[in-house]
Amino acid sequence: SAVISQKPSRDICQRGTSLTIQCQVDSQVTMMFWYRQQPGQSLTLIATANQGSEATYESGFVIDKFPISRPNLTFSTLTVSNMSPEDSSIYLCSVVSGYTDTQYFGPGTRLTVL
Amino acid sequence: RKEVEQDPGPFNVPEGATVAFNCTYSNSASQSFFWYRQDCRKEPKLLMSVYSSGNEDGRFTAQLNRASQYISLLIRDSKLSDSATYLCVVNTNAGKSTFGDGTTLTVKP
């Protein structure tokens, strides 16, 4: 299994500011995923972060709003830019075990935008 | 139509009851299937994978019907600690996971 940590665990931010969320994995992984879970809803994939190349974004998500870095095989960041209250959500980082296809999640970052 | 659809719930059952959750998926190219459990204010955690032959883990039984594109989860002898949201997850061969909206289970004494 993979052990994933995220920082910060929660934050309250003002409208118009940006927040960078960090994700650290205890093993090297090719792909890391960023999800959003809005209150009362299931998980929605934002993008796939590949080491050494640009992230691949899902429909409805763009790089200018959610820039992602992937400097090495154990670390990634997601920035939520120019935040609005609609960005209030839990943001989760995830990796997939290559052997079992099992997905492991970080503890999430709970973001509230005022 | 959503790619992965689950019973809307919520399910409220007494301790000891048997409860079944259903899930359908629309992408016939889907390769692997899972049930995850998410406790309140926590991240999702794998409950069990779902295989074509069906699989059982203690009180939990998962079934897959590829022809009908249908997955189920059966929980026998429900415990209070089973109260959670259960997420149906479907992966394509591209490794992309699609989550259902989840079914909330509350087990009452």
Image (cartoon, coloured by chain):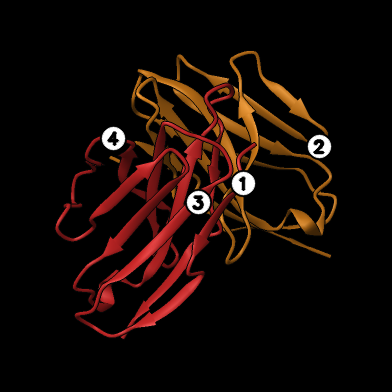
Chain colours: A red, B orange
Q: Which residue is mark 2?
A: B59
Crowding near pointer 3: few (<14 within 10 Å), some, many (20+)?
A: some
Distance in Å between CA atoms under marks 2 and 4? 44 Å
Task: In the rendered structure, find residue A52 and report the number of the disc placed on it.
Answer: 4
In the rendered image, the vertical position of residue A14 relative to residue A47, given as above or below: below
Distance in Å between CA atoms under marks 3 and 4? 17 Å
Q: Which residue is mark 1?
A: A3
Q: Quadrant of the N terminus of chain A?
A: top right
Q: Amino acid at mark 4?
A: Gly
* Whether label 1 touches label 4, CB < 8 Å: no
Residue A56 x, y percent position in the rendering: 23, 39
Disc number lying in front (2 or 1): 1
| Chain to which the residue tagged by mark 1 belongs | A
Task: In the rendered structure, find residue B84 and report the number of the disc placed on it.
Answer: none
Q: Amino acid at mark 3?
A: Gln
**Please, what secondary structure does the residue beneath circle 2 have?**
loop
**Please, what secondary structure does the residue beneath circle 3 have?**
strand
Crowding near pointer 2: few (<14 within 10 Å), some, many (20+)?
A: few
Dots 2 and 1 on the same chain: no
